[in-house]
Image (spheres, rainbow, N blue to C red):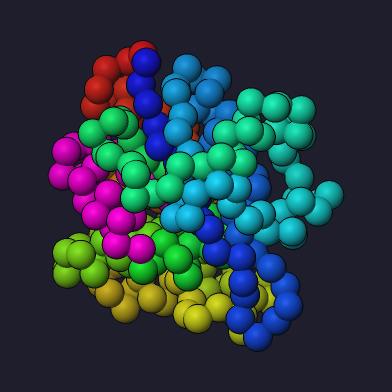
Amino acid sequence: MKKILMVLTSHSEMENTDHKTGVWLGEFTDPYYEFIDAGYELTLASPKGGRPPVDPMSELTENVTGSNRRYQDDEVAKAAFSHTTVLNQIHSADYDAVFYPGGHGPIWDLAVDNNSGILILDFLDSGKPVAAVCHGPAALLNVEHQRPGFLKDKTIAAFSDTEETMVGRSGNVPYLLQSKLESLGATVKTALVPFLSHIETDGLLITGQNPLSAGPAAKALIELLEQTTGAL
């Protein structure tokens, strides 16, 4: 059975506000069930281990997806989410691919997490796919730190500056992810209309723009995995 690692944020605090952040729940649950339904085995990890924080906005009725509802009745999935492995205990050799969900948290912790940056390089250098969605691509900032020039000419999808402004969070984050990635040489491509699904594939790297892109990014990862390692 092929194994996929999912790396989740452990960060919950926004800047200049009492509002909380963390994992955007649908960006975990949509890919989770894509992988489970396709027959993959999943391991969940986070910098601090245990239960990651969940962005309260992602649990509001207007943001609830079918996979969110499925998750609420899935004791196995809830137990896995509540007991993530500490990231520094993870070894890339044990997995066939890695997926980074978003929520704003990654722009604080995974962006500067050396364990995460080295892990991503280990996957890519071993010919294994890496996927990230929404603010998950912030994890690539530490990859750039580990290997300067990594982001130059990479084509990436990520939560856009326009979307950040539209959700009213641009004053609560340390930087705008799209602009940050572009300043390091990446080409960030976005949907013509904000909040529509958009993914990019650049070699072994798959990235998605926003919450609606989480499921499609997972499907793209499955497709790439089956091309590179053979069908399940």
State left or right for residue 41 relative to residue 93: right
Q: Is residue 125 magenta?
A: yes
Above or below: residue 120 compared with residue 71: below
Query: Which image quarter is the C terminus in?
Result: top left
Query: Which image quarter is the N terminus in?
Result: top left
Above or below: residue 105 compared with residue 200: below
Q: Residue at x 35, y 21 (%)?
A: 2
Q: Residue at x 18, y 37 (%)?
A: 127
State left or right for residue 62 relative to residue 47: right
Q: Residue at x 52, y 74 (%)?
A: 161
Closer to us: 64 or 76: 76
Image label count:
0
Q: Residue at x 55, y 78 (%)?
A: 173
* Residue 121 point in image, percent of width and height: 22, 51
Closer to us: 44 or 197: 44
Q: Which residues are magenta?
A: 113-132
Closer to us: 166 or 125: 125
Q: Is residue 10 magenta?
A: no
Above or below: residue 25 compared with residue 107: above
* Residue 34 point in image, percent of width and height: 54, 28
* Residue 90 point in image, percent of width and height: 33, 42
Closer to us: 139 or 203: 139
Q: Is residue 115 visible?
A: yes
